[in-house]
Structures are given as structure tokens and as C-alpha cells.
Amino acid sequence: MRKNFVRRFHYAGLLLALFIVVQGCTSSKAPEPFTLTIAHINDTHGSLEPSALEIRINGTATYTRMGGFPAITAKVKQLRHDKPNFLFLHAGDVFQGTLYFIKYLGMADLEFLELMKPDAMCTGNHEFDKGPAVLARFIDEAVKHFPVLSANISTEKEPLLAGKIKPYVIKKLGGREIGIIGITTLETPEVSAPGKNLVFNDPVKPVKDAISELTGKGIGIIILLSHQGFENDVEMAKTVTGIDVVVGGHSHTLTGRFEGLPEFSPEADYPFVVKNSAQETVLVVQAWSKARVLGILDVSFDNGGHVTGYSGHPLVITGNKAEDFRQKNAAGEKETVSADTFAAISAFLSKDPVLEPSLGDAEAEALLDKYAAPILKLKQEVIGRNDADLWNVREPGDTHETAGKMVNGSLIAPVVADALLWKAKTVKDENTRIAIQNAGGVRGDIPKGDVTVGEVYELLPFENTMVLFDLTGAEVKEALRNAVIRADGAFPYTAGLRYTADLSKTGSDFFTAVDVRSGEEWVPLADDETYHIAVNSFIASGKDGYTLFETVKDRHYDTGFMDAEIFMDYIKAVKTLTLPETRVKVIDSKK
């Protein structure tokens, strides 16, 4: 028995020693480094073509184009080739914004996305603008290539979309599994047209449930792909544990640093770093809008899926040849730069990490050519009638080449304001009382006769979106006062509000009347009353001297609806444009 006991003891000792050795090796094993590259876009809104960009090279204004789907496609392809662990994400609002959407209802955008090969996309509110059927057609094709996500939409009662929008997807890269959860703004039913069968739930519980499912499967890296706005993303990053990165959209937030582009006004760092309740690092990013920039974020994780390091920035992709850049000549006309000037431009771009010439992608550029050709025909499409010549000048008292002196200013700008007010009441808040349109945002006339799509886009060429917020009557007067003093492009045309300004009076209190419409009547604007107001995104950001609007940006809601599309919808609704009532009177304009 003693031999058997000794033998058993000996074997047990050997097993124990082996166990200790194995444990020692395991505990001393160094963490395996894992770095993930995330490229992302959001709120592209049919912007297949590049947007206009002005930069200063050695003090000279230089005009080029930025972004656009062909340039984004080329860069995403390069990153996917160069980066071993790469994700490309779209944070919603592919739909709405240009003639490309009007013509193709998102299917042209989808063909570009198929070239870019997104790993996931979440639904934005504008994906529902044309109802469930149009979105269902988009998703039916999209899911052959990438998943469409939103954890907080209940689709069970909508047969067109039931089961087609997933709460999350799991991707495997470099031996690590990554969970990507999608969410959509809770405001979608108010600002879009999803129908009565879809339910948009508060996203907090669905996100927590998805995180629980993913962590239960042993997944430690979790990305929230969000279309609910930057501030909401930051709040969720702080309060919901388990999220590592939030890739966002909806608020069109420009983040990062642009030292070579001083005209840019970023609102936060890239990435924006948050500590959650467990004091873990969470990174929040967004990439502006309209495919103007491509966000590129590198994130390092430890074995537990916690963020250990990060770097990145939004990339501005410019033209790549001399023909893509113009400067003004001695006569003030824009012309293509010389070879020497282009060499100086290229040197300037190479020194700034956030600026890069387009790599070019023949396949994507051919695709754009294919879809662009029918757009020229679309511009000739008649969308309504105009029974009066709606001439345009900047200020009251200006002279129009055909109509002569226009005592009360533009006739078309007030109609643009009418369209803003109509849209705000229709899609967001029927209690919206006032719309303000700056003169500089309206370019050209709408003569009597048929109104075409092309005319509208020439009238409103800047792709401004409609922004809603609240102001007191006193704040409205202050904003009007500043704009009237500044005048020119800042001059304010209105809907739902009328005013008379006597500039012969000394001091800044030159209003003799400021009234707001109440039903069928006009009543004095009350200084201490709060009014819902609609403006375009240009003056909402404080431009043209509307600095008060920028100071109250915490009250802003950018609907994402573009002014040209709003105006076209308005024309289709009223069918015939008429001469607007006089709402602006300026005494002693000295013109």
C-alpha cells in the first residue's frame, strides 16, 4: 500500500508541478497588440459629386473641390489594402439632398457603396423620407453586400421592412471579434415619413441589451454606429458602459483641427474623448456631412477590449491636377492655375496631414459619369408655374436690370422664406411662427411661366439645410437689427413676420414696427415671448453677421432638408407661385 501511495503522491506531484509551469507561462504571456482602423462617413445626402472648397495658398484664394464619392471610394480602397484590420462604416442619411436622390432614390449612392464595401451602415432619419417601400428596395439590394443596422427600431408590424434591419453585426478581424450596434434618432417619426407601423424606441435599453448579448458571446470590442447627433452620442458614451467607439451622424458635426483651413469651424476634437462611469475611455467621432471629409481613426485595444491608444483625423480630399484648381486673374475672373502655381499648391497640400489630393479611381469616376448624364435632363423638368415675375435684388432700394428700382427689395426671397416656414410646420413643428432668409442665399430670378428643377438649383445653389430653434422676441429683433445694419447679403427677408425699419432715426432702435402673424392677423412681436423659428444652416452658424444665432446653437435642430428641395416641394404643393405680400419696409434706404 505504501508503494501505491508513494506512486500516487509522485504522480500528483508531477501533475501539480506541470500545472504550475503552465499557469506561470499563461500569466506571464504579454498582451497581444491589436490596432483597428475605422474609416467613416455620415449624412452624405446624395452628394456623389465633390463640393466647392476655397483654400488660401501663400495668401491667395484658391478654388478646388473636396470629397465626393469617387474620391472617397479611392481612399477607402487604399486604406483597405494598406491596413490589416480595417472597417468602413456609414452612419446614416444616404438619402435626400441632391438631384441624384430625386432621380435615383438612393440606388446610385448604393452602387458607389458597393464599390466602397462598407462593413455596416445604420439607418438615418432621411432613409424614411419616401416611406418604407423605397427604403425596403434599398435594403434588399444593400444586404447582398453589407448589413443595415438599427437596434431601436421595431419593424415587426411593417411587412415591407420586417426582419431587414438588424440590431448589430459581428465582424472578425485579426483574430478578434468586433460588435457593431446601430441606432437611429428617436425623432424620425417627427421629421420623416416612416409610416404608422414602425416603432422608434429610446435607444438606451436596446443598446444595453445588444451589449449584453455581445459580451455574453465573449466580444470585448464594441462600436456604436449612431445616427442621433453628436451631443446625444457623447451622453450615451458617458452613461452606457461597454461601448468603446461611437461613430456618429445626424448633427453634421465637423470635428478635428484644420490649421490650413482657417475658414473651417470644427466644434470638437477628433476623436472626442469621454470617460464612462467605469472610467474607461470611449472615443466619439463624426465626419461632417455630404462626403466632404473622410474620418480615419486608429484605435489600439488590450486583450480585454479596452481602448489603450488612439489617433486620427478627418481627411479633406482635394483635386489632383492643375485643372482642378483656379485662382482669380487681374480682371477678377477665376481661371485654371499655371503649372508653377499647381506645384506650389501640391507642396502646400503635402505639408498638411488633413489635406490630400484625390488618388483617383477610374471605376468610380466612370460610375459618376453614368449617373450624371441623366441629371442634365432632369434639370429641365417642370415642377410648377409662376404667375408673376419674381425678380431678385439684395436690399430694398436696389435696382434690377429689368424691373428697375425695387423699393421693398427682392420678390423671390420672401417666397423662399415662405417655403422654409411651410416645411418647418409640415415636418417638425406646426407651431413654428417665423422664417428668416438672408438675401445672399438667394441667387437669381424666377420669371413668369414654368418653373424647372434647374432654375430652383440655380436660385438656391449652396445646399443649405433648414435649421430650427427657439428665440425670444427680443432676440429676434436683435438678429434683425444686426442684419439690417450689415445689409447686402445679410439683409433679412421673412415669413410669418413683418417689420418696418426707419434708417433715418439715430441709434440702433430704428424699428417702427415688428409684427408676427397670429392666425389671419398681425400682432406685435412680444419681447418676452418665445418663438419657434426656421432659418438656413448658413446663417444658423453665425455667418453673414447673424452671430446671435451661433451663440444659441445649443438650441439648434438641423433637419437635414436642403433648401432647394424644400423649395421644390413647396412649389409642388402650391402648384403656382404668386406675388408675395410686402413684409419688409425700409425708410430712408438712401438708394
Image: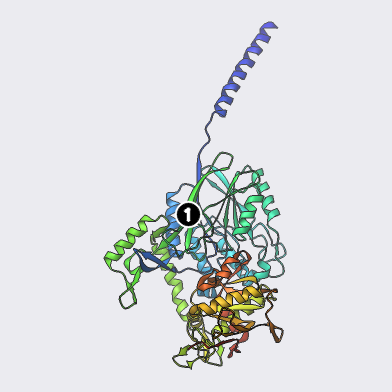
Residue 197, how many percent across, how many down? 72, 67
Establish if 5 lies above or below 586: above
* Residue 586 in view in this figure: yes
Mark 1 neighbour class, 10 Å CA radius: few under 14, some 14 to 19, many 20 or more: many
Closer to us: 483 or 379: 483
Establish if 278 lies above or below 485: above
Q: Is residue 137 left or right of residue 295?
A: right
Image quadrant holding the N terminus, namely top right
Amino acid under disc 1 = His
| Quarter where residue 548 is shown | bottom right
* Residue 378 in view in this figure: no
Residue 410, how many percent across, how many down? 52, 86
Closer to us: 456 or 176: 456
Residue at image position (45%, 57%) is 76
Closer to us: 521 or 141: 521
Establish if 543 lies above or below 575: above
Residue at image position (49%, 68%) is 47
Residue 135, how many percent across, how many down? 61, 67
Q: How is the image coloured?
A: rainbow
Residue that lies at the very extreme toward the left in this rendered image: 340
Residue 504, how many percent across, how many down? 54, 86
- Check disc 1 and report the residue beneath it: 313
